[in-house]
Amino acid sequence: MARRRSRSRAGSKADQEFVSEAEEILERVRLDLADLRDQQARGTEVAPDLVNRLFRSAHSLKGLAGLFGFQPIHDLAHHLEDVLDALRLGKLVLHASAVDLVDRSVQLFSALLEAVGDDAALAAAAEPVPELIRGIEGVKQPPEAPSEAFAGLDVNPSLMRALTEYEEHRLRENLRRGRHILLADATFEIISFEDGLSELSAALREVGEVISTLPAPGESSDAQIRFSLLVGSDLPGDEVASRLDFPDTSIRSIRSGTEAPAPEPGSGPPVAEEPPPLADLRDLESLKSISETVRVDIRKLDELMNLVGELVIQRGMLSELIARLSGDAQTVRIGNELSKLHKVLDRKLRELQAAVLDVRMVPLRQVFEKISRVVRRLRHELDRDARLELRGADTELDKLIVEELVDPLMHIVRNALDHAIEPPDERRAAGKEPQGSIRIEAFQRGNHVVISVSDDGRGIDLEALRERARSQGLVPPDEVPSDRETLDLIFAPGLTTRSEVTETSGRGVGLDVVRHNLTLLGGAVDVESTPGRGTTFLLTLPITLAIVQSLVVAVGAQRFAIPLTAVHETLLVEPTDIQRSEGRELLNLRGEALLLRRLAREFGLPEADPDGRRFAVVMGLGDARVGLLVDRLDGQQDTVIKPIQGPIAAVRGVAGATELGGQEPVLVLDVSAFLAEALGRREAA
Amino acid sequence: MSESGAPVLGGGERWQELAREAARRRDVAAESVDLVQLLTFELAGAPYALPVERVREIVRIRPITPVPRMPAHVCGVVSLRGEIVQVLDLRRCLGLPPATPTRASRIVVVHGSEGGVAGLLVDGVTEVFSAAEDTLRPASGEGGVEALCARAETFVSLIGLDRVLGFDGQ
């Protein structure tokens, strides 16, 4: 399977690793920066977490560049880190020029990363670094005058001394805004304090900002631990206390809020929009351990997946054996014992399968970020003004699906921007806002993730679509397809609704390809449209995707898939090659007798020509081998094996079904069942 | 639109809408009389029905992959937006003569009693109507028909879904 790795042309493996890791950090910075600009543009308070995250990213980048010895990147990151640190500590006012500097740094980082692996190019790309660093030095302002001590706070002074510089800054900021400052004292059992503390923190974040979480001084018993949480809230202490009902927790005001908060331009909701992803306690430590993640090559995960798959097949063999042991009076006891063990093994194996699948899951955030960058660029190129709204970036999908999703999603978004969103004056004439809107929303629904892409553009002209489909022969002239059916025609191969070709949307490659590609992933795409109001595409994708390479074979008109892990080789078999012994068919395979089974007979299917040449698929697990005779080989495919749902219990020999791009499912053979049957019969014979 | 063309996803949407509407009406009506919403369809020219609450969706006929070694009343499996679901030939389940699906044929996707789903192949979907529960007459016998319900001049046979889904072809 050819998979796209890093985009960079970087040479050595170390360089590659550096670039891919640095790009990941940079992606995060871009995203946070976009959020920050948004919040500034809306005039809301910039979420403190956002600046923190930016700071951490710069810090990571600095460390990474230092580790790999990329001095210019290290230097730039170092200065950027300084500025961001000053910003998060409130030493520097967050104004447009500071944000611009961060922006310019990000662009420069991109250029530098592009050049990694080519020393001359890198030196050239690094030229603007000193100038930018001077710029960064320029915006650093004298630190704000040491503010009034926190007099009037009714709190243990030792607690105040424990506050970090950042926490002091947040406390000052909350005081300045005239918020109530609350102190929550909570006692937890040591064994479970993490859960209790994160619950309490989450609840407190609902009503305000958790400024600091500290172990409370003194008197905790051995089995218990006390924490004090300093909270800034718009609600007074008694109200918060009555809202939250936590055992062994007291909440009191240590300073009442002032009636009129200090004026703040367009002060918006005081609570940060997204709660920090980690429990507060870990958040405090997170500057020490920047990341607890390990980067793994997806191929290694595939190997793990395959190993688990093989274990599952072996388990199948085991259950066959157990059935035989249990069916014999002499061995029934040992069979029953084994069956108990088997149940445990079965459960653990399922857990293992789920855990390995879980590792492959990644959030859609990166895809969304790519799209928003492209949209930003296209807005200029196409002169279309459209707002892009992204929701559900944390929705997780299999890494491979996420990679394959970028192109179809991009295609739909480009279409929306290029064709659906009208030019501003046309929108005004239609009574719409001059700025169009494209909204991408992802959410989980059962075992699937649904991604909807909606625009508020002109919608799909059904009449024109019908005409076009007719003129292209996609619809018989005497037939009038329903609106629903007509809309579905946009996925028909070769159909375009616009005669001109643009660079952005291209031509030829259309929504039919989008649908085809999504179907290959086991997904689907649907469309809804209201003329004049807009269009919504709904992409449905399976969350879990265990991709297995399969050999596709055919008997008569029906195709079947055989997991490649169980296929040893395939042979062309002439009728004269087949020998018979005791009613069984055999093949001389390099001196060994290979038992043959005809798939057509096993499955009661019509055989094309019983005496014609055909193919033997040599399947095996462990030492067991059997040759399966089929009419045709249809090549290898990536398949997703799905369970068959329905009231009738699974049949022997069928492990599940898969989709190969066509509409009808293709059955996946259960190799272990075939082996057990064939070999079992040999023993019986 | 050809039958073999691109999948008509949500082809049963109109029916779902009808069903939802009916369900809303029922919510109001249920307070006075016990009404049951029935989806009616045809099999070999006669009307049959299922409780709407057991119907997940109705889809157009689509390519069905036969599954070997399954009982004869299982037509095979279809893909519903990536879900692989067995389709039962409701005619065979009820002992009616089998027939080749036509353009009017539909697959009624129903919820099993234990959370699973299954497709039922029917000749064509007709309507949704509500019947007072006390007008249902239990059917005699062990077959797939559980009750009869008068609808205008005819009797509609109410399918005992769990009996049908439990039918193993013997």
Image: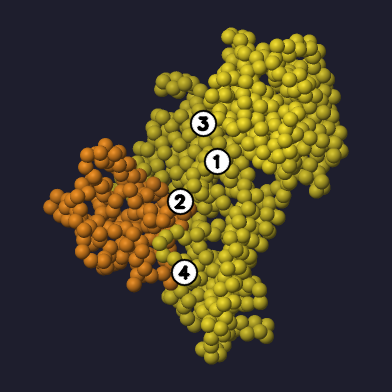
Chain colours: A yellow, B orange
**For the residues tagged 1 and 3, is the chain the same?**
yes
- On the image, numbered disc 2 is attached to which residue? B81
- On the image, numbered disc 3 is attached to which residue? A438
> Which residue is at the front of the view, A547 or B5?
A547
Q: How many marks?
A: 4
**For the residues tagged 4 and 2, is the chain the same?**
no
Secondary structure under tag 1 reads helix
Above or below, comparing residue A657 to residue A120 in the picture: below
- On the image, numbered disc 4 is attached to which residue? A651
Image location of residue A609, percent across then percent down:
46, 79
Residue A264 makes an appearance in the image: no
Secondary structure under tag 3 reads strand
What distance separates the C-alpha of mark 1 from that of mark 2? 18 Å
**For the residues tagged 3 and 4, is the chain the same?**
yes
Secondary structure under tag 4 reads loop
Q: Residue at x 81, y 44 (%)?
A: A15
Amino acid identity at mark 2 = Arg
- On the image, numbered disc 1 is attached to which residue? A409
